[in-house]
Amino acid sequence: MPHIIPINELKNISGISDMCHKVDEPIYITKNGYGDMVIMSMEIYESTMRQLSMYRDIEISEKQIENGQIKDARISLKEKRAKYGL
């Protein structure tokens, strides 16, 4: 269940910070009954950014596969090992 609070509750900064770390998900802030902002802990933000980066990498890989820009894994690993002297 998403946590939704009105903007006037942001006066309690310490309490909001505690809530961000306790609920482990974004908190939605409303203004005049409408969605206005989202706040979250640094841990949740960083996790979300890692997931977004992974999804972008998958999307790039899928486009490369569609365009025939693929390379055999064994050949690729052999090239990487040679490049880094492994």
Image: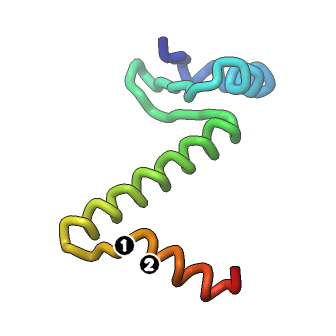
Seen as rendered, the residue at the extreme right is: 14
Q: Which of 1 and 63 is in front in this view?
A: 63
Left or right side of 26 for 64: left
Q: Position of residue 18 (x, y in %)?
A: 77, 22
SS type, badge 1: loop
Out of 17 and 21, give the one closest to the viewer: 21
Label pair 2/1, CB-CB below 8 angstroms = yes
Quadrant of res 15: top right
Query: Does residue 28 appear left or right of residue 42 in this picture?
Result: left
Q: How far apart are marks 2 and 1 (CA)?
A: 5 Å
- The residue beneath circle 1 is 72
Q: Which residue is drawn at 25% across and 66% down?
A: 65
What's the residue at 63%, 36% (across, down)?
A: 44
Which label belongs to residue 75? Answer: 2
Side (left or right) of 19 relative to 51:
right
Q: Which of 57 and 70 is in front in this view?
A: 70
Q: What label does residue 22 carry, if any?
A: none
> Residue 73 appears in which quarter of the rendering?
bottom left
- The image shows residue 39 at horizontal and vertical percentages of 59, 34
* Amino acid of disc 1: Asp
- Above or below 50: residue 41: above
Of 14 and 65, which appears nearest the observer? Answer: 65
Q: How far across and how far down the image is residue 19, in percent?
A: 70, 19
According to the image, what is the colour scheme of the structure? rainbow
**Crowd class of label 1 (few under 14; some 14 to 19; many from 20; radius 10 Å):** few
